[in-house]
Amino acid sequence: MMNNEFANYSESTFDSIKHIDNYGNEYWEARELQIVLEYKEWRFFEKVINKAEIACFNSGREVNNHFGVNSKMVQTGDSIRKIIDYKLSRYACYLIVQNGNPKNKVIGLGQTYFAVQTRKMELTEEEYEKLSEDEKRLYRRKQIKDGNYLLNKVASKSGAKNFDKFHNSGYRGLYNSENAGAIAKRKGLRYREDILDNMGSDELIANSFRISQTEQSLRNNNINKESEANNPHFRIGKNIREVIKKNGGTMPENLPTPDWSLKELEKEQKRKVGTL
């Protein structure tokens, strides 16, 4: 059993560098984690990050959703230079400490700290298959929320300013020229009701793939013009649509709209809890 000194140290060590973004999501910055894990040089720590990214990919998860590139400008002496940093999810931190130097005592602390909540947040394939359709929808919707946050950050750096136009480019590619408004109208939604909250799990999976692939494309191609940022979003949406068609799948616009939106499901869950 872990003694109190060990528990307090692990909590104070890793909680002290935890950040919360504007959407309430927790994350850690790699440069800060490097110091805590006692890596004196970034080049050595980055090798550990690369191993963790491979482990993330091999686990079937979207690497970009957990290892967000976060470049920043720092002052060294009289000059300012650009350095690479990462915004890491709890799961990314967990993989990093699993691949870290076991001789460092703090690595063991990190393995304990990050493992507990990560196990609660991540689902195995077997666990996912046991979920109800509504539970799968909630799970996929959370993934899209995280993915869109990273996509918006990268798109902004790539020159996107009109985000309605940017996101509609992706929808038009995936939904055969339908934008968000047209999708909402077809689904019979109320004004300003979120279309993503009114999709089934299969439709959410297609959109999650669109989001992650666009984010990766923008980052890898060094795009810095708004028109050039919108074009790959449309192209990737269209490519995914073509793959669905080629494999004999159901087109996104032909998938059924659930009877309950996710907002309604969440309200119902809270109501049931309140009556217990």
Image (tube, rainbow, N blue to C red):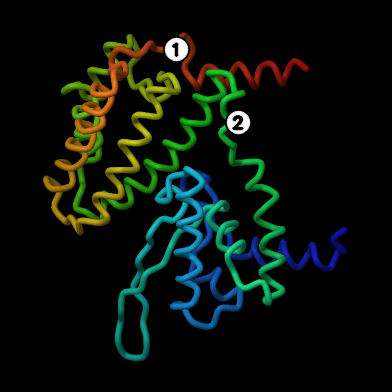
Disc tally is 2
Amino acid of disc 1: Pro
Picture quarter with the N terminus: bottom right
Q: Position of residue 207 (x, y in %)?
A: 34, 31
Q: Secondary structure at mark 2?
A: helix
Which residue is nearer to you in this view: 197 or 113? 113
Image-based side of 233 in relation to 145, left or right: left
Q: Position of residue 211 (x, y in %)?
A: 32, 39
Q: Which mark is residue 239?
A: none
Q: Position of residue 248 (x, y in %)?
A: 29, 18
Q: Which mark is residue 258?
A: 1
Above or below for 36 versus 95: below
Q: Which residue is mark 2?
A: 126
Picture quarter with the C terminus: top right
Amino acid of disc 2: Glu
Please give the name of the residue rendered at 66% of the width and 69% of the height, measured from the top-left corner: 107
Image-based side of 71 in relation to 236, left or right: right
Judged by depth in the image, the label closer to the viewer, 1 or 2, is: 2
Which residue is nearer to you in this view: 191 or 126? 126
Please give the name of the residue rendered at 41% of the width and 18% of the height, measured from the top-left corner: 198
Q: Secondary structure at mark 1?
A: loop
Disc 1 and disc 2: Cα gap in Å? Answer: 24 Å
Q: Quadrant of residue 206?
A: top left
Q: Quadrant of residue 108?
A: bottom right
